[in-house]
Amino acid sequence: MSSVSIFFNSFHIFQGFLGLSMNGWILVIIMVSLSGAAFFIYYGAKRNGQFDDVEGIKYRMLFEEEEEWEYHD
């Protein structure tokens, strides 16, 4: 038996688990990680109140406010 056939026979164990190859499992792990990260970013923004006033932000530029710029020399 050559070393090439031994490699492919040992690689065969990765191709049978739930019908996915090794590349498929890597893709699944990456997609679950990215989805989890996106969920935690959304949860953190929701918890900090980022989505509380979605309509008022577009009218904020119409209100005149005094600028409180003080320059100290």
Image (spheres, rainbow, N blue to C red):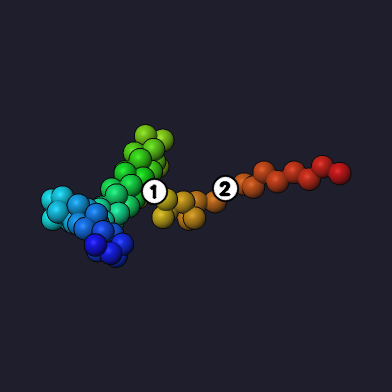
Image coords of residue 54 (percent x, y): 35, 48
Pointer 2: what residue?
65
Mark 1, Cα crowd under 10 Å, few <14 / some 14-19 / many 20+, is: few
Give the residue type that dot 2 points to.
Glu
Q: Where residue 29 is drawn, which disc sits there?
A: none
Closer to the camera, 49 or 54?
Answer: 49
Pick out the residue farthest to the right.
73
The residue lying furthest to the top in this view is 47
Residue annotated with mark 1: 56
Pick whichever of labels 1 and 2 is earlier in the sequence.
Answer: 1
Residue placed at 31% from the left, 62% from the top? Answer: 3
Residue 72: x and y, percent? 82, 42
Residue 48: give x, y in percent of width and height.
Answer: 41, 35
Nearest the eye: 24 or 64:
24
Q: Is residue 12 above or below residue 49?
A: below
Above/below status of 38 relative to 48: below
- Callout 2: 10 Å neighbours few (<14), some, many (20+)? few
Taking depth in this image into account, of 61 and 73 the one nearest to the observer is 73
Q: Is residue 30 visible?
A: yes
Q: Quadrant of the N terminus?
A: bottom left
Residue 53 in sight: no
In percent of the image, x 64 and y 47: which residue is there? 67
